[in-house]
Amino acid sequence: MQEAWVGLDLVEVARFEAALCRHPRLKERVFTPAEISYCRARGGPALHYAARFAAKEAVGKLLGSGVVSWQEIEVLAGVPGDGMSRGGAPKVTLSGRTAEIAHERGIGALTVSLSHVDSLAGACVAAVARPLGGGEMDVASYLDSDRGPAALRSLVERPAVFTPTQVRELDRATIEDVGVPGPVLMERAALGVTLLIQSRYPGRHTLIVCGRGNNGGDGLAAARQLHLAGHPVACVVTSGQAGLSPDAALNFRAAEKTGVNLRTGEVPDYLWDETEVVVDCLLGTGAGGELRGRVAEWASLINAAGARGVPVVAVDVPTGVDAATGNIATGTVAADVTVTFHTAKTGLVCPPGAEAAGEVLVWDIGIPESLEPEPDLWVVKDDDVNVPGRRVDDHKYRAGYVAVLAGSIAYPGAAWLAAQAAYRAGAGYVRLLMNSGAADGVRNRLVEAVLQEIGPGDHLADAESVLPILADERLGALVVGPGLGRDQDTLTAVRRIITESALPAVLDADGLFAFAGTPEELQGRPGLVVTPHVGELAALLGAPIKELAASSVAAARRAAAATGQVVLLKGSSTLIVAPSGDTRVVVQGPPQLASAGTGDVLSGVIGALLAKGLEPFEAAYAGAWIHAEAGRLGALIDPQGILAGDLVEMLPDVIADRIYERGPSWRS
């Protein structure tokens, strides 16, 4: 039976039209010029835009990838009969990385059907497997296993993350206990590299730079596979043939015998000049520390090629990245894409190693999943995020009542951002608690949130006026810290409020300094999410930043153990750790989130999710994912100047797809 794929999606036309009106530049970010021209020429363009957006989303679902660009999926009229207009049946054209993903999965031509019923526009996209031929590599001939051809998978598709030590043990068990020879695993690893090069960079002159270990052996095997497939490739073994690992030496001899353009020690300038792709196979996941000697020189040459615009592919891990921690050495190879084997490694999802790795793709080399230990680190994917919807009999308090204790005369905007984010994340009622002097900065901006002054002055000075408010049994969650300031009386008040109230709570920003050096005071307090960046974490734990930055996972787990609470460590990749040590990571948040106030938005989102009844760990990782996705959506509209307030406006569009329906409360 021929393999087939189907993707379905529905879009509410009025809601999509409102989004286009609210964000004028969104249209140019989502649709190609040809699509815009087509829709403008039709009556009721909102319907046509919504249907095409549904088709793009359906293609993404069909591909099984959350990493597609909407503009790389073009939906235009073809022959008559689409049921949407006189223009004819729609035709889908893929380009860029999206086309490469389809090619990697063996997906052939796409067929799309667009329709609309009442207020909804829908799309159904179907495809069958592409027949092999025309000089393409027959992947099945390389994969002599009962699992058949595999595919390069994104972190969303293979979310489990292991340490290098765990993966080395899996390698050992596969070789010694299962009986799969090491060279077979190396051949399969090389196939993943070969498949990526052939599909993403067809016909481009490729230089593979190999070290002496098994990482170099992977590169040597890939060079042979590419050469036999007719791809222009050269391979250099930087250390010469002496000292190669046994499996690497085996593949060196095989490369020689099959006529690969094989070099040892040096690469002439002309070969660098004609190189259009460079592959880093210098060091594998067992390496760590600073780069020295010839390895440092070769890493510098690879980076110089990358600086000229040559794509850099890293094999398993970029040279210089500590795969166990994410630490990077001086001169670390900056990859555009990293092909890693079996699962992602810790250092590929944690900063700063995640930045050096670029796009991470996971390739299955045939290690039985039955050998795996239970992972304690997972990448958060969209299906992990489930936001409770409104019940038909909900009222504003049951929908989620959040108190926000934030802001001072110096930082009134932090309070406004947290309160607005809580509303946009679905809270039904938000009460903003501020001192009168600080409240003047937001009074005229507040429409929905209730402003309650908790005393005179320009900052929080005592807990007495706050604790009775928190005794309201309708309250679902508390957000404490954004913009409060660090006056001693403020920190003393925060300490009392957090330790004496049992409300589910978010402790953020300035509020964290109330427990600086005494994280154990938070032990036993129910339902708390602590949200530091590394500087705030250093203050909380009383530890040097450099010590904590050596391993972000270890630092976050240390904080969770010290506080007995859920810890969300902010960064380019955000880590969420439960007191048990169970860890989630939201990978590679967009750089547009590096803007003042975006952390206040995150606090408000998590506060709303807590008020809706999510457990602290789930509320924290769901909030971090929603926050990152809102940043990605905002970056489509403004790649450079997105503000925290803009981020708030993106939240409903992100959350809408993650809501699950609930029946009336009396059914619960």
Image: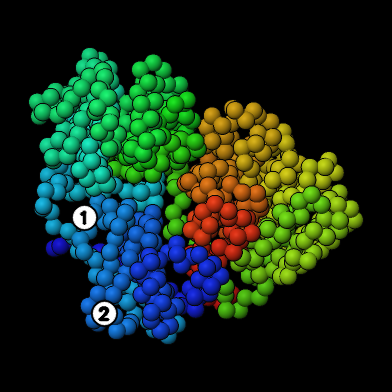
Report crowding for label 2: few under 14, some 14 to 19, many 20 or more residues within 10 A (C-alpha): some
Q: Residue at x 10, y 29 (%)?
A: 258
Most foreground residue, 179 or 530:
530
Please, what secondary structure does the residue beneath circle 2 have? loop
Q: Residue furthest top?
A: 242
Label 1 – label 2 distance at C-alpha: 28 Å
- Quadrant including the N terminus: bottom left
What amino acid type is highlighted by mark number 1? Gly
Most foreground residue, 584 or 257:
257
Q: Position of residue 138 (x, y in %)?
A: 13, 47
Find out whether the residues at labels 1 and 2 contact each other: C-beta distance under 8 Å. no
Most foreground residue, 480 or 315:
315
- Quadrant including the C terminus: bottom right
Q: Which color scheme is applied?
A: rainbow
Q: Position of residue 537 (x, y in %)?
A: 64, 37
Residue 454 is left or right of residue 448, and the answer is right
Q: Looking at the image, is 312 positioned above or below residue 626?
A: above
Q: Looking at the image, is 258 positioned above or below residue 118?
A: above
Q: Residue at x 50, y 49 (%)?
A: 590
Q: Which residue carries the number 2 mark?
A: 88
Most foreground residue, 373 or 315:
315
Q: Position of residue 412 (x, y in %)?
A: 76, 55
Q: Position of residue 241 (x, y in %)?
A: 21, 17
Is residue 540 in view?
yes
Q: Which residue carries the number 1 mark?
A: 106
Residue 364 is left or right of residue 570, and the answer is left
Task: Specify which label sits upstream in the sequence, 1 or 2.
Answer: 2
Q: Residue at x 46, y 39 (%)?
A: 355
